[in-house]
Amino acid sequence: MSGPLLALLLAYLLGSIPFGVLLTRLTGAGDLRRIGSGNIGATNVLRTGRKGLAAATLILDMLKGTAAVILAERLVPGTAQLAAAGALVGHLYPVWLKFAGGKGVATLFGLILAFSILGDLHWAAPAAYAAAWIGLLLLTRYSSLAGISAAMLSPLVAAILGRFDLALLFLGLALLVLWKHRGNVDRLIAGTEPRVGARSNG
């Protein structure tokens, strides 16, 4: 069991790196947890007015998921799915921030991308995720709605591609993403959810 446990721990540690917090601190943009919604993801970084920082946070949060899965699979073959779960949990509940992490949309995309790079999943899966995410964001300007929709689409696409094992994994991960967005869901229903570019404290 030492191999799988090592892969899980490594993935969790990679996933738990709070790039949004680190980048805003290093560039003098302040403590991200005291800005806007207090979330550590790219959408909240955008509220600092630093578009470059927001883009960097998005990319790094995505790539840490990709790196965690590929590195774990290379070191301990057969642990990619375990590592995917560990990386997302690390991002959502990082020990360094008292388990108050991000919401997982970018990191989940990075995990799905990793399975395509490893050859375990057709490239249609990350393409569909990106299309749903970006398309709905442009259409509605609701970052939360776009992210939730893309996440919930991922198990369906994996099932269509015949990877029912990954469909179950992605369903579990998508439900975690949905849980982290429960406040956003409440505001979407109430009609008070802020759109990207709007000033908000929520």
Image (cartoon, rainbow, N blue to C red):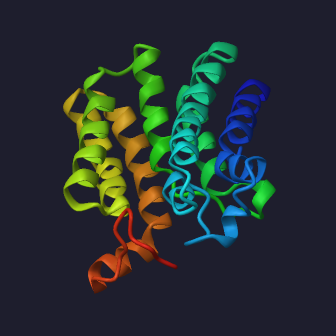
Question: Residue placed at 39% from the left, 20% from the top?
Answer: 116
| Residue found at the very far bottom of the displayed protein | 190
Residue 93 picture location, percent across and down: 66, 57
The picture quadrant where one finds residue 109 is top left
The picture quadrant where one finds residue 140 is bottom left
Question: Residue placed at 48% from the left, 24% from the top?
Answer: 114
Residue 27 picture location, percent across and down: 73, 48
Q: Quadrant of the N terminus?
A: top right
Residue 78 picture location, percent across and down: 57, 20
Answer with left or right where residue 132 lies relative to residue 166: left
- Rendered position, 195 above or below 190: above
Residue 73 picture location, percent across and down: 60, 19
Answer with left or right where residue 196 lies relative to residue 179: left
Question: Residue placed at 33% from the left, 31% from the top?
Answer: 126
- Rendered position, 56 above or below 76: below
Q: How many marks?
A: 0
Answer with left or right where residue 10 lies relative to residue 120: right
Q: Nearer the viewer, residue 199 or 116?
A: 199
- Rendered position, 94 above or below 87: below
